[in-house]
Image: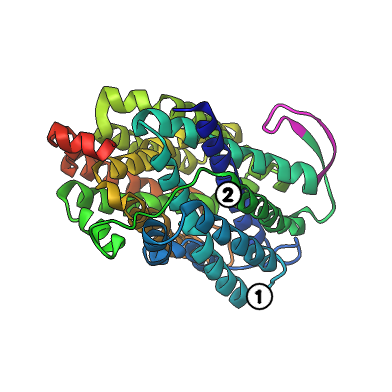
Amino acid sequence: MKPAIIFRLSVMMFLQYAVWGAWLPIVARFLKANTAEGGLGFSDTQIGWILGLASIGAVSAPFVAGQFADRYFRTERFLGCLLALGGIVITLLSYQTSYTAWLLLITVYSILFVPTLALSNSLAFYHIDDADRDFPKVRVWGTIGWIAASWAFPMIWLQTGLKLGWMPPFLVGSEIDGVTASLVSALRFSGIISFVYAAYCLALPATPPKRDAVEQLAFRKAFKLFTRPSCAVLVLASLAVASIHQIYFLQTSPFFASLGIMDSQIGPAMTIGQFSEIVMMVILGLMLKRIGFKWVMFIGCTAYLARYAVWGTASLPTWVMVVSQVLHGLCYSCFFATSFIYVDRIADEDVRHSAQTVYGIIILGAGPVLGGQLSGWLGTVYTPEGGQLDYSSFWYAVAAMGLVTSVLFALLFRDETMRAPASDVASAES
C-alpha cells in the first residue's frame, strides 16, 4: 500500500474516535452528580435510557449509511455530511438540562453519528490490501485519537496551573471552581472536533458506490450473512458483550468518583485502557494468524470477566482498580476489532459496507440499549433505599454475565474462515 493512503486513513480514524472520546467516558458523571455539585441529578434508570439511546442510531444505520454508501453516494462525502450535522446537534445538547431534551437530542445525534463508525471502517477496508495486516495499523490511530481528546479536554477546560504528574495525562493542575458543572463542555469540544473531521473528509480517498451490485438493496443481502451458524453465535455473543461493554461507560466515571478520583482526572485515568488497546491493536494481526479468530475473540470475552471481577473486589486499593483497565485493550481489540475483521472476511465484496453496518446494529445499537436498561435495573437492585449504589455487588453481577458468555462462545462458535474453500477466502480478501 502507498504510505500516503495509510496516513490519510489513520488521520480519519484519529478524528473518528476523538469525537467520541471527548465526551463518552465522563458524561455519566455529569448526568448522575446532584445539582448541588453542578450535575443534572438523573437516576441510574434515566442515565441508562440516555446513554442506551446514544447508540440507537445503529438500528437505522443499514437503511441510512449502508444502503446509501453502498449504492448511491461516495462514502467520504456522505461521512462528512453526517459529521457536520452531528456536530450541530451535540453542541445544542450541551445547553440542555431536562431529561426529555437529553433523550430527544441524544437520539437524533445517535442517528447521525453511529453510522459514521461503520462507514469509517468500511472506507478503510475498501482501500487496504490485507485486512488482517493493515486494518489494525490504521485502527490504532482511533485509539490514539480517543486518548488525545480525553487528555486535552481537562487540560483546557477543567484545570489551571498544569504541572508534571505520574498519572495520565502526566500534566496535572488545580481544578477550577464548579468543575463538575464544566464537564458538560466536553460535548462542545466534541462538536468542534466533528466540524474539523467533516472538513477533513474532503481529503479522504474517493470511495465510489457500487452501482453494478447484484441486489437492489445491499442491506438485505448483508442481513442474510448473519444467518450462517458462525455468525448467529457471534451475534448472540456480541449482544451480551456489547451490553456489558456499555455498562463500562455508564458506571465507570461515577464509580471512580466514589473512589475519590477528582472529576478532572476521571477521563485521563480511563485512558489507561486505551494505552493497552494500542499495544493489542499492533499485535492483533499476528494473534489472528497464530491462534485464529475464535480464540482471539474468546480472550476478549474473558477479559471483560476479569476486569469486572477486579472492580467487584472492594478490598483492593484504588490504584489496582485504575490500573486494571489495562484489560480494556484485550476487551476491545480482541473481541470487537477482531469481529469486524471476521465479518469483512466472510462477506461478499459488494455488500461489505452494509455487512459492517448490519453488524453495527448489534454491537453499537441493540447491545448498548440493552446495556443501558441492565445498568439501570442493576443500579436499582443494588442501591438500598436512601443509600449509595453497592458497586461491589454490581460489578460481580456484570462479571457473571461475562463468564457465561465466554463459556458459551467457546463451546458453540465455529470459525468459518478455517473451513471455507481457499477460493472463497481469497474472494473475501480481494
**Looking at the picture, which amino acid does disc 2 mark?**
Cys
Which quadrant would residue 66 be assigned to in this image? bottom left
Q: Name the mark on residue 181.
A: none
Q: Position of residue 289 (x, y in %)?
A: 29, 24
Write the start and end of the magenta stretch as one range.
159-171
User: Is 367 rendered above or below residue 233?
Assistant: below
- Give left or right: position of 150 versus 383: right
> Looking at the image, which residue is at 31% across and 43% down?
344
Tell me the crowding category of disc 2: few under 14, some 14 to 19, or many 20 or more residues within 10 angstroms, Cα based: many
Q: Circle 1 — which element? A: loop
Residue corresponding to mark 1: 98
Which quadrant would residue 96 be assigned to in this image? bottom right
User: Is 418 rendered above or below residue 204?
Assistant: above
Give the mark nearest the N terminus, 2 or 1: 1
> Looking at the image, which residue is at 75% across and 28% down?
165
In which quadrant will I find the C terminus?
top left
Residue corresponding to mark 2: 201
Q: Are marks 2 and 1 in contact (CB under 8 Å)?
A: no
Q: Nearer the viewer, residue 133 or 103?
A: 133
Q: Nearer the viewer, residue 48 or 332?
A: 332
> Looking at the image, which residue is at 62% across and 60% down?
84
Q: Was residue 242 drawn as part of the magenta stretch in this picture?
A: no
Measure the alpha-carbon separation of dots 2 and 1: 34 Å
Q: Position of residue 139 (x, y in %)?
A: 48, 37
- Give left or right: position of 238 versus 76: left
Name of the residue lying farthest toward the front: 212
- Give left or right: position of 178 versus 403: right
Q: Position of residue 11 (x, y in %)?
A: 58, 38
